[in-house]
Image (tube, rainbow, N blue to C red):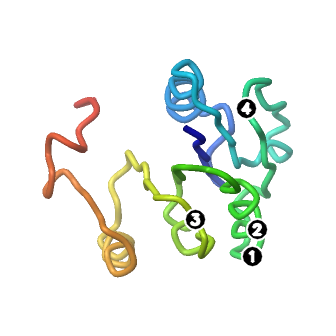
């Protein structure tokens, strides 16, 4: 499987994204493209993944362009910022919005208007990764 993982606000070396999620995908033999603000944080991307640099808190157009480059040939897109949901390219694989922080009701409502949203209230056993 080819996965694209994207963020414009998190540090590219974020423990949850890079060291757990991406590392698990790579260790399982999947190909990973990582869209992240590498230059802003002065980070050199890991060798085993394909990197797409994007500006920190990128504008809609720049985020959309970076996502378009990142999802080429991808089977799955995992986004970590609610703002990226509005910048999704029209041609894209299935999307997972991975969020750990509490989501403001307005962001959840907006996402629900455009996407199928699965929350702990809908499928408790399908969304709980760890209680902490």
Q: Residues within 10 Å of mark 3 (few under 14, many from 20)?
A: some
Residue pictured at 43% horizontal, 55% vertical: 97
The residues bearing labels 1 and 4 have C-alpha atoms spaced at a distance of: 24 Å
The residues bearing labels 3 and 2 have C-alpha atoms spaced at a distance of: 12 Å
Query: Which of the two residues, 79 or 103, is positioned nearer the viewer here?
Result: 79
Quarter of the image where the C terminus is located: top left
The residues bearing labels 2 and 1 have C-alpha atoms spaced at a distance of: 6 Å
The residues bearing labels 2 and 4 have C-alpha atoms spaced at a distance of: 19 Å
Mark 2 or 4, nearer chain start:
4
In the rendered view, tell whether residue 111 sits above or below residue 13: below
Q: Nearer the viewer, mark 1 or mark 3?
A: 3
Q: Residues within 10 Å of mark 2 (few under 14, many from 20)?
A: some
Q: Which residue is mark 3?
A: 92
In the rendered view, tell whether residue 62 sits above or below residue 77: below
Secondary structure under the numbered disc 1 in the rendered image: helix
* Image marks 2 and 4: residues in contact by CB distance under 8 Å: no
Judge from the rendering whether residue 69 lies leftward or rightward of residue 83; answer left or right. Answer: right
Q: Nearer the viewer, mark 1 or mark 4?
A: 4
Q: Nearer the viewer, mark 3 or mark 2?
A: 3
Mark 4 or 3, nearer chain start:
4
Q: Which residue is mark 1?
A: 61
Q: Which residue is mark 4?
A: 49
In the rendered view, tell whether residue 123 sits above or below residue 86: above
């Amino acid at each position: 499987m080819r996965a694209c993982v994207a963020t414009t606000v998190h540090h590219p070396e974020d423990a949850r994204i890079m060291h757990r999620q991406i590392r698990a995908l790579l260790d399982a033999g999947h190909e990973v493209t990582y869209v992240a603000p590498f230059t802003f944080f002065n980070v050199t991307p890991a060798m085993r993944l394909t990197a797409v640099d994007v500006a920190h808190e990128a504008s809609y157009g720049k985020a959309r362009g970076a996502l378009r480059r990142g999802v080429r040939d991808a089977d799955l897109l995992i986004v970590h910022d609610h703002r990226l949901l509005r910048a999704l390219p029209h041609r894209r694989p299935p999307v997972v919005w991975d969020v750990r922080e509490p989501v403001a009701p307005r962001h959840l409502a907006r996402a629900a208007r455009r996407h199928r949203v699965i929350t702990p209230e809908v499928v408790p056993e399908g969304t709980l990764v760890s209680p902490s």
